[in-house]
């Protein structure tokens, strides 16, 4: 008798999301010229306006709120998919002293694209 091992339902969808996230970045990067592809640039603008009051969102500098990790550290800590799910949760329920924020799924993706464009510190590589 043959037994097929099956992955739990839903994993195919997550895998699809992961592939989409991974594909979006190099495709945009290949367009060249602009220092940041469009989605990263939108994510950067969002991060500056919504997150920068607590987090360091640039490639250097300390976070205004010492407890909030600099975004360049997050890049090394999460793979794109878990970061995306975490940000979706954060947008919905808020986190720490931050109130819930109104981010669309595609805005979450932009912020993820931006965070992942930041070089993680050497120690996290
Ligand atoms: C009012 C301050 C504040 C604002 C605004 C804020 N954060 Fe945070 N965030 C924090 C603090 C504080 C922590 C870490 C707390 C800890 O680790 O104990 C944190 C942690 C995080 C983490 C890592 C936590 C985890 O569970 O992985 C992510 C990701 C994050 N923030 C994303 C964002 C994003 C994206 C924005 C903007 C849309 C944002 N934050 C805006 C205060 C803030």
Image: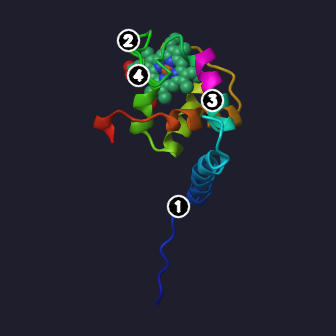
Residue range highlighted in magenta: 43-50
Q: CA distance from mark 3 to mark 2?
A: 22 Å
Q: CA distance from mark 4 to mark 1?
A: 33 Å
Color scheme of the displayed model:
rainbow
Residue 96 higher or lower than 89, as above or below: above
Pointer 4 local density, CA inside 10 Å: few below 14, some 14–19, many at least 20: some
Q: Are marks 2 and 1 in contact (CB under 8 Å)?
A: no
Pointer 3 local density, CA inside 10 Å: few below 14, some 14–19, many at least 20: many
In this view, the mark in front (3 or 2) = 3
Pointer 1 local density, CA inside 10 Å: few below 14, some 14–19, many at least 20: few
Residue 66 disc label: 2
Residue 86 lies, in percent from the top left, at 52, 34
**Badge 1 residue CB within 8 Å of ligand 1:** no
**Nearest to N terminus: mark 3 or mark 2:** 3
Q: At 64% across and 30% down in the image, what residue appears?
A: 41
Residue 52 lies, in percent from the top left, at 54, 15
**Nearest to N terminus: mark 4 or mark 1:** 1
**Residue furthest to the left:** 123
Residue 69 disc label: 4
Residue 99 higher or lower than 37, as above or below: above
Q: Say which quarter of the image contains residue 78.
A: top left
Residue for badge 1:
8
Query: Count the marks: how many?
Result: 4
Residue 93 lies, in percent from the top left, at 59, 23
**Nearest to N terminus: mark 3 or mark 4:** 3
């Amino acid at each position: 008798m043959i037994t097929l091992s099956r992955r739990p339902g839903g994993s195919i969808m997550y895998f699809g999301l992961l592939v989409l996230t991974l594909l979006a970045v190099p495709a945009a990067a290949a367009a060249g010229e602009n220092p940041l592809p469009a989605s990263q640039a939108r994510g950067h603008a969002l991060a500056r306006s919504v997150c920068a009051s607590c987090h360091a969102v640039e490639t250097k500098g300390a976070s205004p709120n010492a407890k909030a990790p600099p975004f360049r550290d997050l890049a090394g800590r999460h793979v794109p998919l878990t970061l995306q799910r975490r940000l979706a949760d954060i947008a919905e329920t808020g986190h720490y002293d931050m109130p819930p924020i109104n981010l669309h799924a595609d805005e979450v993706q932009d912020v993820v694209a931006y965070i992942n464009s930041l070089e993680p510190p050497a120690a996290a590589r």
